[in-house]
Image: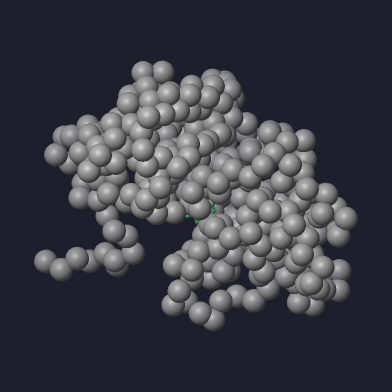
Amino acid sequence: MTEPLMSTYNRLPIDLIKGQGAKVWDAKGNEYLDALAGISVCSLGHAHPAVAKTLSEQASKIIHCSNIYGIPAQRELAAKLCEISGMHKVFFGNSGAEANEAAIKIARLYAHRNDIKNPVIIVTEGAFHGRTLATLTATGNRKVQAGFEPLVQGFVRARYGDIEAIKTIAQSTANVVGVLLEPIQGEGGIRIPNDQYLNDIRELCDANNWLMMLDEIQTGMCRTGEWFAFQHTDIKPDIMTIAKSLGNGMPIGACLAQGKAADVFQPGNHGSTYGGNPLACQTALTVIKIMEDSGLKDRAAQLGIDMLKHFHNSLKDTTGIHEIRGKGLMIGIELTHDCPQLVSMALDQGLLINVTAGNTIRLLPPLIITDSEAEQIVQKVCAVIQQFVSK
Ligand SMILES: *Cc1c(COP(=O)(O)O)cnc(C)c1O
């Protein structure tokens, strides 16, 4: 039989059919420890009973009704997200890319209302913002863009982590309306900018009347030890996008805004058929409640510190390690050489990991992992690295 799926992914040779907490099983009954959580999606682990209960109860009441009508769970979720983020208004979509599309549209509309006819958004090298035409244009990776030209106009690129690069653009480019970036680059290799970077960007945005737009799709929802990574600083963005862990696997994304960005959208400017439907919103409310009740952000922060320490200790005499870095349970181990083979080698050891940017092991385990599971992840990853570099 020919393969009926479009060939968009190079898939690993296992079918995952069941999960429980931080463990998953393939169709042959093999067990794996999940150190990736579907790329920072299943932060509460798999088959969480309270999430499953919400899904089934809500499905028996109402799944969808259209945004033509009021949706209480959507209002409640928006209020909750504003409470934990300090933002003021929310638009719901179904994915990260859609959340970023909303952010880009708000920035353009804001520009046009301020008589900027050809607005430009500053984006960064190594960024990942999604696969739609506008978001792949904003993405700083040629592989994501190649073959899809003509790209969308109105983006200029600055080196990530380098405030001077943005200042140079500010001087040479008219019509800048905002900056869009990840507080820590995920896909780009767990790149953590210096502590001052976000503050400097905030200052620059304020001085120039630009919008500061943070893509927290991977970093948000307790992943880095705060609800949102910007909360490690004392600044606030004008726009923030989230998705991934918000629904723990139930597709949902959101674009949050405050201040001058909060009321840019008016009826008719934007929309989504599924966006913010009762099922997705009720599920996200449950996700937030569990995260809150179990103090998951503090737990993620502590586990991150512990795991980084163990990695540093265990790998201090291993050659081929360029850098070990992370914040909360967003951890990257950059090797000196490309290491895509590590993914299959880990799989053989019963561990799900990811390698991004060619040479960086990316760990995004469920935030509910036990101390023992965290320890097993460190041991297995170190064993696989040692096996790899000794070859
Ligand atoms: C995953 C991701 C996206 C895209 O989200 P989708 O739901 O796949 O559209 C955008 N930005 C960042 C930082 C991401 O990690």
Residue 65 seen in this snapshot: no
The picture places residue 168, in percent across and down from the top left corner, at 77, 64
**Quarter of the rendering occupied by the N terminus:** bottom left
Location of residue 103 in the rendering, given as x and y in whole percent from the top left corner: 67, 58
Using the rendered view, name the quadrant where residue 318 is placed: top left
Q: Position of residue 40 (x, y in %)?
A: 46, 41
Q: Is residue 90 above or below residue 248?
A: below
Q: Between 93 and 334, which is closer to the camera in this rendering?
A: 334
Residue in the image at 75% along x and 66% along y: 169
Q: Residue at x 86, y 60 (%)?
A: 208
Direction bottom: furthest residue? 150
Q: Is residue 77 left or right of residue 190?
A: right
Q: Nearer the viewer, residue 339 or 13?
A: 339
Q: Is residue 176 visible in this depiction of the protein?
A: yes
* Residue 35, quarter of picture: top left
Q: Nearer the viewer, residue 196 or 241?
A: 196
Quarter placement of the C terminus: top left
* Residue farthest along the top direction in this orientation: 371
Residue at screen point 32% across, 51% down: 340
